[in-house]
């Protein structure tokens, strides 16, 4: 894994490997032994209650992020508050930005978030396709952009999301991973291996869950309790190194 870098955010805070197939019947027709009740799911993203150890992941507070050889992580820091607002992983010309948000107990928010993202892209003159993907429905966006030499261009981005127990995890794939399935596969595996650590504090839906720098990460049992909820700040197109550059 590469070195961490701090990246200042502008403005306010802002697939995976296939699941293992069931075991085939053992020789002689006897069914294979089933996993015991302590067996962990073979694929995520996971809730902290579903895993018994951190495994090969780095502790970023609300997110435990898997690491791969050559993966470089950048922590996005809000200039005004100095709080960590997101984490971006880059690998071989591709990027993955990950953020975790609070969600209601009884319903997910990815369906309505996709509609909001699609509407925002359309207002910028871009186009969006809502398609099935390895994590469920996802968005393939093509967003107008201006190159360094002033030419008009299109920036592709893939928005993926997963609703968990009282949390929502969003990922944005950029660069080659947004348009090339082969390039996307390693970063999809990173997203699939994320563990979300939702603290017990009351939080409004879409409140950004607290991220920390690697040496400040916390385990679930030491997560902050009783924190006052903050005002929801959720704008899916103004977070991340690729998206924030588009105005």
Image (tube, rainbow, N blue to C red):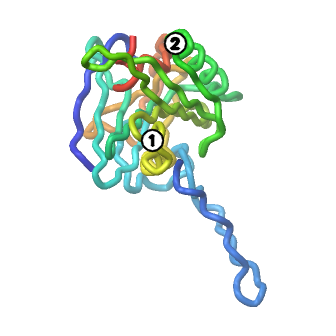
Residue to which mark 2 is pinned: 125
Pick the residue in front: 141 or 163: 141
Q: Residue at x 29, y 14 (%)?
A: 150
Q: Give left or right: position of 148 versus 227.
A: left
Quick one: which residue is furthest to the front in this view?
A: 151
Q: Earlier in the sequence, mark 2 or mark 1?
A: 2
- Tell which of 13 and 245 is nearer to you: 245
Nearer mark to the viewer, of 2 and 1: 2
Marks counted in the figure total 2
- Residue position for label 1: 220
| Circle 1 crowding by C-alpha within 10 Å: few under 14, some 14–19, many from 20 | some
Q: For the residue labelled by badge 1, is the local secondary structure a helix, a strand or a loop?
A: helix
Q: Nearer the viewer, residue 15 or 178?
A: 178
Q: How far across and how far down the image is residue 242, in percent?
A: 37, 26
Residue 142 to residue 233: above or below: below
Residue 194 visible at all? no
Q: In screen coordinates, is 54 left or right of 35?
A: left
Residue ID at (51%, 34%): 198
Q: In x, y percent, where is residue 231?
A: 49, 10
Q: Quadrant of the C terminus?
A: top left
Q: Residue at x 40, y 44 (%)?
A: 65
């Amino acid at each position: 894994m590469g070195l961490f870098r701090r990246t200042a955010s502008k403005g306010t805070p802002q697939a995976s490997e296939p699941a293992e197939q069931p075991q085939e019947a053992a020789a002689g027709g006897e069914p294979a032994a089933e996993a015991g009740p302590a067996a962990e799911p073979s694929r995520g993203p996971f809730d902290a209650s579903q895993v018994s150890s951190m495994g090969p992941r780095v502790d970023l507070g609300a997110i435990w992020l898997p690491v791969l050889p050559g993966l470089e992580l950048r922590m996005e820091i809000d200039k005004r508050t100095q709080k960590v607002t997101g984490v971006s992983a880059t690998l071989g010309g591709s990027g993955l930005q990950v953020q975790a948000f609070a969600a209601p107990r009884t319903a997910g928010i990815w369906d309505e978030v996709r509609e909001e993202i699609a509407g925002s892209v359309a207002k910028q003159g871009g186009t969006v396709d809502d398609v099935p993907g390895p994590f469920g429905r996802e968005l393939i966006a093509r967003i107008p952009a201006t190159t360094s030499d002033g030419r008009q261009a299109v920036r592709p981005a893939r928005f993926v999301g997963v609703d968990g127990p009282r949390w929502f995890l969003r990922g944005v794939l950029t660069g080659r991973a947004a348009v090339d399935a082969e390039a996307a596969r390693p970063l999809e595996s990173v997203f699939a291996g994320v563990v979300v650590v939702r603290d017990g504090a009351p939080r409004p839906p879409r409140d950004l869950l607290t991220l920390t720098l690697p040496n400040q990460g916390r385990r679930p049992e030491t997560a902050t309790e009783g924190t006052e909820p903050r005002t929801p700040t959720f704008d899916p197109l103004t977070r991340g190194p690729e998206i924030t550059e588009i105005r």
